[in-house]
Image (spheres, rainbow, N blue to C red):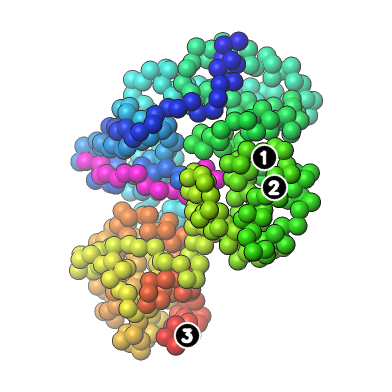
Amino acid sequence: MRFLGLLAFSLFFSLVSFSQKTVINGIAPGAEHKVIRVATPCDLITFWEKNLVTSRVDSTGHFSLSVDLEKTTSVIISIDFHKTEIFLEPSKSYEIRIAPMKYDEYTEVNPFIQSQNLMLEIVESDPQELNNLIGTFNSIYSGFLTENFNALYHDRRKILLDTFRIQLNQHFGSVKNAYFLDYASYKIAALEQLTQYYNQGQLAKKYFTDKPVGYNNVEYMDFFNNFFSKYITVTSNTLRKLDFTSLLKGADPYKAILKAMTVDTVLKNEQLRELVMLKGLMELYNTTTYSQADVLAAINAAREKTKFQDNRVVAEDIVSLLTKLQPGTMAPEFTLLNRDQKELSLKSLRGKPVVLCFWTTYCEGCLSEMDLIKPLYDKYRENVCFVSVSADKYFSKMLYFINLKKDYVWTFVNIGDQSDVLKDYDVHTYPLFVLIDKEGRIYKYAAEQPSNGLEADIQKILQ
């Protein structure tokens, strides 16, 4: 069958070899004057995000963005903390409509738990456009799985999967989009794993061993993440016998582990083997059996020595993820407006330790703790910078409140629409205190609150 034949093609037939501009025009009623962002995961193992482009919705609700892409990319479009996802292809233009929303109803919430999904529509798009193809495929796939899950999983009725392939061929037999074909192929691979259509060795040979690594295809990487979960310590009959503790403590753990993993014939492809090693090391980091310092050293060695640029990106992202906000790492930068509506950057405060306090006017606990900052400020202001970061949506709300508090004389800044600052500092609850040293590095996260030992932390950092 043509569809199945196309699925057998080499993964990631070269889509493009150079950067091409992709344009997004659209409308988002209710989001007038708000910032709209387009971001993408740097890799699909850590999902460490990077911003591609930002713009501002105009007074009529319209916006326009453009981004240079080298390959088909899954991106996240966000307004405030509300998100939606879309696939973008190089050199294409998209006309989108985001459903109306009352964004300002979400001004006094924890954005990490009360964000909403943005409803997105691509206006007047071709049914053969990638997002439409994937949407149609996912709808058919979900219906099939819902109707037949017990028969597939419990009864292992493999014939149902054969029938489903015929159904897919009738819908998508003429499709030539390489990204979609690989996407569909690895969704089917998940069903083959569910029904035990093939054993693990056969699945690995069919979908990994002799295939190029599909770093940017979300379904390839989803299948990869599931297939190789705890692979080096549990799933692989050969690798689980290795003494990773000794290998990690050797002179060159990166080289030693990579060489030891060659005993697994599934991983004869060096690029795949190295990626599986990185995923496995990330899992070992959070296992009490292994030294985090040793694991981190091995990942850093992989970052420096790998021959594969995509694996270097993954290693860098793993290090960033595992060490985020750890003592000694650089505190995330920001530039926000102070009470005088002048820009204040964190970098400008270097030379003195900084006490950051994330707070809101509607948080009662924040207010009681900030009352206790005043005596600390009076005592240490010559040697320490105190900065209270208001997460209130509107600058005017912060300003009105602190103007009522005549003894709130230290530095105040407001997040406004720079919600990325809250993500950078993982602000899930208020108040949150962070202590930063004079070089701009994290000294303690989260620091104690004024009512519970912050002064002791300040004295330690000054010593």
In this rendering, the answer to whether 388 lies above or below 256 is below
Residue plotted at (48% across, 73% down):
444
Q: Is residue 52 magenta?
A: yes
Residue 264: x and y in percent read 73, 42
Which of 166 and 355 lies nearest the eye of the viewer? 166
Mark 3 touches mark 2? (CB < 8 Å):
no
- Determine whether the residue tagged by mark 3 lies in a helix, strand or loop: helix
Mark 2 touches mark 1? (CB < 8 Å):
yes
Which of 89 and 10 lies nearest the eye of the viewer? 10
Q: Earlier in the sequence, mark 3 or mark 2?
A: 2
Tell me if mark 1 has few (under 14), some (14-19) or many (20+) residues whose alpha carbon lies within 10 angstroms of its own: many
- Determine whether the residue tagged by mark 2 lies in a helix, strand or loop: helix
Q: Which residue is mark 1?
A: 267
Q: Which residue is mark 3?
A: 460
Residue 328: x and y in percent read 47, 71
Which of 388 and 128 lies nearest the eye of the viewer? 128
Residue type at numbered disc 2: Met
**Distance between mark 2 and mark 1 Cα atoms:** 7 Å
